[in-house]
Image: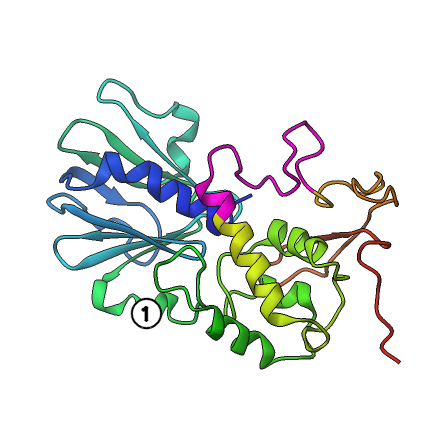
Amino acid sequence: MPEGDSVHLLAARLRPRLMGRIVVDGELRSGGRAGEPLAGRRVVELDTHGKHLLTRFDDATTLHTHLRMQGSWTVTRPDRSLPTRLWRQVRVRARLDDGHTLWGVDLPVVDLVPTRDERELIGHLGPDPLRSDWDPGEAVRRLRSRPDVTVRAALLDQRPMSGLGNLWANEVGYLRGLHPATPVGAVDVEALVDVAARALRFSATVPGAYQVTTGRTRRGETHWVVGRAGRPCLRCGTRVEARDDPPGPDGRSRRAWWCPRCQPAISTS
């Protein structure tokens, strides 16, 4: 699933191919600057914040992109191109001075802005555990500021703490023994932030650990609750339950999973 760890790993994969390279031919094919040529720009930095990828150029501009659920990046060798069936989905094309070509496919968000204006696009994001400026105290403060919000909704909201998507919101809730509907004001927020941050960093930095939350790599056992509706909990054997949330502002519905025994609902009366 495309979450903060996904984008962190994507940037790590792209850096050896892109850093220091000059775009000799290419353009944006989506967003407010569609048609903008990219030729002549040198890539000087790839940065991430939460689920956002920031590709910075030497002319003090930044290409800001977001994968959401469908986007992807790929690099082809000098003698290769994308399959023709994907050409209509290309949103960014950049042929580099070593002959490789960078393709942004089906990206729902494409912005080219002055680097000084990046905060207009990502300034709302909360602290990111995968960044060097990670501030757990600030994440705790922001989460505590809305005690009536459910834990699940709070973890999905990128403003208190960025980088956690639906997979991690569910799995972190399980690891802390919290029912998805538990209000933030009823939980140990410091412990919640600590577990979430450690899980995201472990996934992003340890080989073979990407989005494996159980420590088991066997098919069907990599997650405690995600994707396990109707199946026995790997810890206690209770049937895992699931429900679909109402569609959010983006029109998409997200699924919540939980173990009724390991994550008991609390009384609100």
Does residue 110 appear left or right of residue 262 in this picture?
left
Residue found 85% across the figure and 55% down from its top:
260
Placement of 12 over or under 112, stated as above or below? above
Does residue 206 appear left or right of residue 34 in this picture?
right
Placement of 78 over or under 132, stated as above or below? above
Q: Which residue is mark 1?
A: 119
Residue 45 appears at what percent x and percent y?
A: 22, 50
Residue 149: name its quadrant: bottom right
Q: Quarter of the image containing the N terminus?
A: top right
93 magenta-colored: no
Residue found 70% across the figure and 70% down from its top:
150
Front residue of 169/247: it is 169
Front residue of 176/159: it is 176
Q: Residue furthest top?
A: 79
Residue found 48% across the figure and 68% down from its top:
136
- Magenta stretch: dominant secondary structure: loop
